[in-house]
Amino acid sequence: MPARAQDMVDLGPSLKSLAAAKGLVFGAANNTYWLGFPDFAHAYARECAILVPEYELKREITEPTPGVLDFTAGEQLASFAHAHAMLLRGHPLVWFAANPPWLDEAILSARGEGIFRDYIRATAGHFAGRMHSWDVVNEAIEIADGRADGLRNTNWLKRFGPRYIDDAFHAAHEADPASLLVYNDYGLESDTPDHDARRAAVLKLLEGMIARGVPVGALGLQGHITAFGPKINQAKLARFLGDVQATGLRILVTEHDVDDGGGPTDFVSRDRGVADASRRMLDVALDNRATMALLTWGLSDRFLRQESTKETLLRGTPRKLPFDGAMQPTAMRGAIAQALREVRRA
């Protein structure tokens, strides 16, 4: 049985209070289904100061029928955030995935940029004045696609060329000039040739946008890392984030979790690996003065599942977030709390 809210162990200070003491904001992805569990909702309200919808603002949810927008689910999360004095951030306005089935053909046959500019204006405009930040363009880099600029060969790129990224940011700024506009991407943390190339491509993209006067305000460092796979070279990560800081942009860790697959099967070893990996990234990212927020991609392992029955039998539930399935704190929560306590920002 899941633990009741009153049965939770004494956690000490909340993550949001530890973050606030260092001038940071802590939060997590959330969705309307999870909020149906009272113990989860209680823990989320206690720990988080900023909410980002997991799925509710993705275009497959907001525009299942062309031209008919539905923000009902997003508004439910916005209401929860407002009721608990939380900030709210939007995710995402332009992405190659999580789109309605009709959109791919519509992109390729579009006569103009309204296919994304109108959507951005309507969506960002609907929430104008309520969003702390928006992930305007999500995951536009893919080195394996072979372009010299590193851009992912999406339908957006095929139809509009690289300018679609600039145009998306301009449209978002027109619709909600008060929101911090974020370029969000993954694969920027670990010590591999692919991550080296992705870091270089993202930095080049950001520097070009700034030079062209695009209203980008921050980099979203997703922070999906592994406990038993490629490691983080802290010096490399620090140099990259220092280069981002030098552009004048802010930094948010937007989707942090730690994959505990591929290593030991016992929870103690897995938890230790997850906590160590999380600290290795956060000790660098949170010390950078440009970093303003840390969000995990979910708060509880309760809603995670292994990819196969065999893995479920062998490994049980994944252990990659701050709370386990019974809403008890994991070693990862302890690692995040300690990383927040030890932030050193010169």
Image (tube, rainbow, N blue to C red):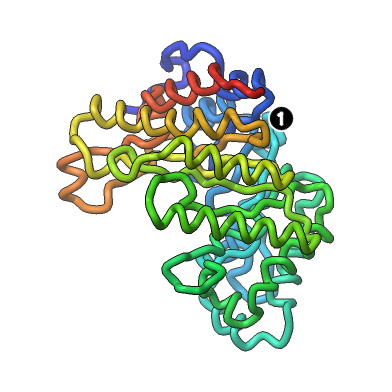
Task: Tell me if mark 1 has few (under 14), some (14-19) or many (20+) residues whose alpha carbon lies within 10 angstroms of its own.
Answer: few
What is the count of numbered marks? Answer: 1
Q: Picture coordinates of residue 93 (x, y %)?
A: 65, 61
Residue 21, x across and y down, in percent: 66, 18
Kindly identify which residue carries mark 1: 85
Inspect the image, locate mark 1, and give the three-letter code of the amino acid beneath it.
Ala
The quarter of the rendered structure image containing the C terminus is top right
Residue pictured at 72% horizontal, 51% vertical: 181
Tell me the residue at 18%/35% (across/down): 265
Q: Is residue 112 above or below residue 23?
A: below
Q: Return the x and y of residue 307 as percentages of the image width and height.
A: 27, 52
- Residue 46 drawn at (x, y percent): 57, 23
Image quadrant in which the N terminus is located: top left
Secondary element at tag 1: loop
Residue at left offset 33%, top offset 35%: 319
Name the residue at 54% across, 18% down: 342
- Residue 34 visible within the image: no
